[in-house]
Image (cartoon, rainbow, N blue to C red):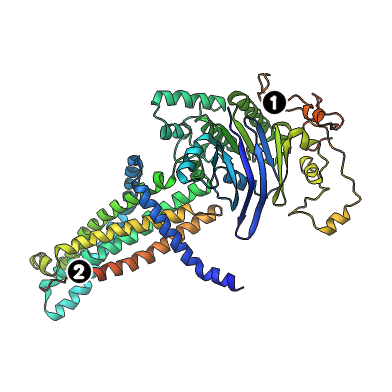
Amino acid sequence: MGVEIKIEDLSKSFGKQLIWGDVTLTVPAGEVSVMLGPSGTGKSVLLKTLIGLLKPDKGSVIIEGTDIASCSEKELYEIRKLFGVLFQDGAMFGSMNLYDNVAFPLREHTKKSESEIRDIVMEKMDLVGLLGAEDKLPGEISGGMRKRAGLARALVLDPEIVLFDEPDSGLDPVRTAFLNQLIVDLNAQIDATFLIVTHDINTARTVPDNIGLLYHRHLAMFGPREMLLSSEEPVVRQFLNAQKVGPIGMSEEKDADELEAEKDEAMPPLPPIPMQLEPSNGIARRSQREPGAWCRENGVTPPPGSFDQNMSMAPGAG
Amino acid sequence: MASTTATRILAPVGTAGKLFAFGLDVGRGLFRRPFQTREFIQQAWFIASVTIIPTALVAIPFGAVIALQVGGLIKQFGAQSFTGSAAVLAVVREAGPIATSLLIAGAAGSAIAADLGARKIREELDAMMVLGIDPIQRLVVPRVLACMLVAVFLNGLVSVVGVAGGYVFNVVLQDGTPGAYLSSFTALAQLPDLWQGMAKALVFGLLAAIVACYKGMNAAGGPKGVGDAVNESVVISFMLLFVVNFVMSAIYFQLVPPKTG
């Protein structure tokens, strides 16, 4: 059914360097959310904090009434059974073949017989399109296959929350599109809460129900997709439309001189909001909202040309 | 400025503390069920396979060198009949545990640190924790136990091969008599020597495995980090093992009075 993740006032620093502070947001149950941010803003750190691999300095992460940040190790291992996590490179166990990798959580946590395990593993392998590759070792397959295998392993215990750490990094645009479609289909099928960390604009614009943006050591904005895509907020606007003009610079935020220099440069107009990616069987997901619904409810006029079926989905198009 | 100096000076203390805490975690993991029998057997087999041949090859010259050194000296005293006992004493009390520690730390420890380090940087350990499995219980405990077991066996191997090597050199090269070599075996050496050798090997296996696992699991910074972790683990365990060897020998001499031939 999906479980909501309630993050309150979360701060994390390494040594003296603050990664992000006072992050407060609620990832809604059963919905697909994307967390965006320029490179090096601690997106992966946030993800690792959510599963308790890193302890925050302050704040809480509440899942089903348990605070991940302060609970005991035993509770932590218990609550982690709700999670499925897709790591950047799949994080497959190098010494096992794909079948054993996917079967691993089942063998460790359930008392299922080998034939039951076989059924479940084959079902998940089929889901990610890896049937026939069970006997391969992780070292023998491509990065995209490793990611899909990692996804199969993440799904095998029927998680309530699925976290994706840059599912699209290192994949070509076609594979990324397939993976995005897979994510949407999965959400329609298992209704779990999805949180995707990425900096791929195309994914962010078309896949999620909600978008969040981490920038300059804080959470700049978190809300429904249409709210961020129609936002006039400079940081959000610059990032979601992949533009150079705006407060984000090459290394960090731009300094006063740079901002002064581009003061007169107007930001290009907002590109139209694309349609959300639909499940491939055409049946709407439970958490899916009608295109333009948020804009109408909140009296926001979407940029011209929004929600046009034939619109180009290339990043920064407009 | 003062604070940075203080942090720098105190850093090794922190590392030592973390290593100790890790050791305690492993101790706690020892009693957590289910015990990973399969992993334990696989690891014991693996560690044995990387250490047995080097250990035997190290033990032969070790026994021979003792035979050469002691043989020459003892001849001047006219006490050739005691060469056998000198070889047994040196090999069983010191050479066995030392050669074992070198091989356990150098061959087994580096292999463990490299393996866990590679798993760490490929996020395999994180993935394992996320799947609700404690890597200390699943991976570290079987390795530590396997290392201890194999260390005890290696100690026995070194003792046998070392004494045999000494015998061959003494009898073949130094014209010693087989009877004198064999009959003086128990003149100076005694049974507790054997026990203390085994106890040392057990402790060395424990320390080397804990250091290797700790360093491997805390590798950071990509492939270079794994190399650094392996390097540090070998250096740290060498230092630790030699210090512990000295301490244990000193305690042993206090507890068990040397036999007077």
Q: Residues within 10 Å of mark 2 (few under 14, many from 20)?
A: few
Instruction: Tell me, yes or no, if residue B152 can be seen here.
Output: yes
Secondary structure of the residue carrying tag 1 is loop
Name the subunit of mark 1.
A
Q: Which residue is mark 2?
A: B255
Quadrant containing the N terminus of chain B in the rendered view: bottom right
Horizontal side of B187 relative to A95 (left or right) equals left
Task: Count every numbered label the image shows and give the total.
Answer: 2
Q: Residue furthest front?
A: A65
Q: Are marks 1 and 2 on the same chain?
A: no
Residue B6 location in percent, x, y? 54, 71
Residue B98 location in percent, x, y? 29, 64
Q: Nearer the viewer, residue B26 or B75?
A: B26
**Residue shown at 42% from the left, 35% from the top:** A108
Horizontal side of B243 relative to A122 (left or right) equals left
Residue type, label 2: Leu
Quadrant containing the C terminus of chain B in the rendered view: bottom left
**Residue shown at 48% from the left, 45% from the top:** B125
Secondary structure of the residue carrying tag 2 is helix
Could you give the CA–CA distance between mark 1 and mark 2, rounded to whole angstroms? 77 Å
Up the image or down, B163 lies above or below A142; here it is below
Up the image or down, A298 lies above or below B153; here it is above
Q: Residue furthest bottom?
A: B76
Q: Which residue is mark 1?
A: A288
Q: Locate residue A251: give its quadrant.
A: bottom right
Residue type, label 1: Gln
